[in-house]
């Protein structure tokens, strides 16, 4: 466990005493949000977050609203980036926490975390970031980014599921959300998942050694996939920032089809994909992220998220580029929206 703490701390520029092991990213997010709220409610009851956060943060904030806390949900632009001026305008003397994710799990957009960290530090407000998607893909330095807490999940680094951690800067006023023993610096009661933690540490070690080359390889494959889909499928919208984004995520909205039907067809053909967050893949509601960046409901319903990883090859990209346009053509043949579009003179 100590070795794993050392490896994780080294990766983010922290010390091993600042790493608190949890059951995963969701618990880490909950500990950050509820822990700060409970420990600092004497100072204030105002929290700032964004409309495109992971549900582990958004639903924690909604629960706190029922307890009398005020939550500000920041807007984002069409690429999914928060407005720094709006952020600073919403700060009050009662603000105790800013929680903004590093990179979005659906569209891959990278937020201006360093700038947000400077604002939080200037106003003496705790700053938490969900870095579950970004860790191991892009650089995270907690000191350089002025971060007080970050959430990490092992399985996003190809480590075991069911384990993660929360980095907690020394001096942060945080109360536990689980009560029992005195494990994890009195911040997370319960017997630690030692095998999971050992695997987590090893996954971090491998990620550090491979990241530089892997980022270049994945970005090349993602760009090839995007250009290929752009050439082969008409009426397709690519979501997320064109440059400030993760190398492994491609999100698009294919107009005039229903996302769930598309996912089922692709699944039959051996292609794993989702219509939004993988954590919400059973939901029939359009993605809250896509609605927040301004997509209409009917367009958001046709969204497709393709994630690339360590095992993705050029042959995989070729297969998707061959299969996906045929599936889209087949689904559009039965789409009343597409027929109406053509009837009004739209180009097929």
Image (cartoon, helix red, strand yellow):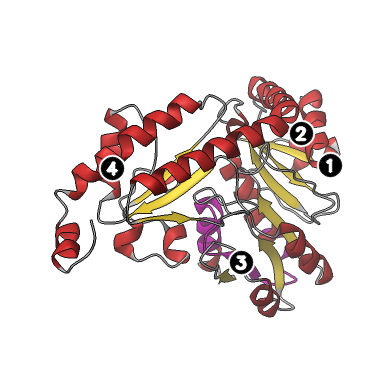
Q: From the viewer's perspective, is residue 313 above or below residue 300?
A: above
Q: CA distance from mark 4 to mark 2?
A: 38 Å
Q: Secondary structure at mark 3?
A: loop
**Viewer-proximal residue, 14 or 308?**
308
Q: Nearer the viewer, mark 4 or mark 1?
A: 4
Q: Secondary structure at mark 2?
A: helix
Q: From the viewer's perspective, is residue 252 above or below residue 17?
A: below
Q: Which residue is mark 2?
A: 8
Magenta highlight range: 38-63
Q: CA distance from mark 4 to mark 1?
A: 43 Å
Q: Is residue 190 left or right of residue 275?
A: right
Percent x, y of residue 172: 80, 54
Cβ–Cβ under 8 Å for marks 2 and 1: yes
Look at the image and tell me in which quarter the C terminus lies: bottom left
Q: CA distance from mark 1 to mark 3?
A: 26 Å
> Which disc, if any, is residue 241?
none
Q: CA distance from mark 2 to mark 1?
A: 8 Å
Q: Which residue is mark 1?
A: 14
Which tag, 4 or 2, sits closer to the chain's start? 2
Q: From the viewer's perspective, is residue 51 above or below residue 231?
A: below
Q: Residue at x 51, y 63 (%)?
A: 62
**Viewer-proximal residue, 124 or 248?**
248
Which tag, 4 or 1, sits closer to the chain's start? 1
Q: Residue at x 85, y 53 (%)?
A: 171
> Which disc, if any, is residue 262?
4
User: Is residue 217 magenta-colored?
Assistant: no
Which tag, 1 or 3, sits closer to the chain's start? 1
Q: CA distance from mark 2 to mark 3?
A: 28 Å
Percent x, y of residue 320: 38, 33
């Amino acid at each position: 466990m100590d070795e794993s703490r050392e490896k994780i701390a080294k990766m983010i520029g922290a010390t091993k005493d600042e790493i608190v092991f949890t059951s995963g990213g969701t618990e880490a997010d909950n500990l950050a949000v509820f822990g700060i709220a409970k420990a600092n409610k004497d100072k204030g009851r105002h929290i700032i977050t964004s409309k495109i956060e992971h549900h582990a943060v958004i639903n924690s904030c909604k629960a706190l609203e029922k307890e009398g806390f005020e939550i500000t949900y920041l807007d984002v632009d069409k690429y999914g980036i928060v407005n720094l001026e709006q952020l600073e305008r919403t700060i009050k003397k009662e603000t105790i926490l800013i929680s903004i994710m590093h990179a979005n799990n659906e569209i891959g957009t990278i937020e201006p975390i360093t700038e947000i960290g400077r604002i939080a530090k200037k106003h003496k407000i705790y700053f938490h970031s969900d870095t579950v998607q970004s860790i191991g893909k892009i650089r995270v330095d907690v000191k350089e980014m002025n971060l007080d807490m970050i959430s990490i999940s092992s399985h996003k680094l190809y480590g075991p599921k069911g384990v993660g951690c929360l980095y907690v800067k020394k001096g942060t006023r945080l109360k536990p959300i689980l009560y029992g023993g005195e494990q994890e610096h009195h911040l997370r009661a319960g017997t630690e998942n030692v095998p999971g933690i050992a695997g987590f540490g090893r996954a971090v070690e491998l990620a550090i050694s491979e990241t530089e080359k892997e980022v270049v390889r994945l970005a090349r494959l993602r760009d090839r996939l995007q250009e290929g889909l752009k050439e082969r499928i008409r009426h397709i919208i690519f979501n997320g920032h064109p440059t400030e984004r993760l190398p492994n995520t491609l999100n698009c909205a294919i107009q005039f089809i229903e996302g769930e039907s598309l996912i089922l067809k692709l699944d039959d053909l051996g292609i794993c994909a989702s219509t939004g967050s993988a954590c919400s893949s059973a939901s029939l509601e359009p993605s809250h992220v896509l609605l927040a960046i301004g997509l209409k409901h009917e367009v958001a319903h046709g969204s497709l998220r393709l994630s690339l990883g360590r095992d993705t090859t050029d042959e995989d990209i070729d297969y998707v580029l061959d299969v996906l346009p045929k599936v889209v053509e087949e689904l559009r043949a039965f789409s009343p929206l597409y027929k109406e579009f053509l009837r009004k003179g739209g180009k097929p």
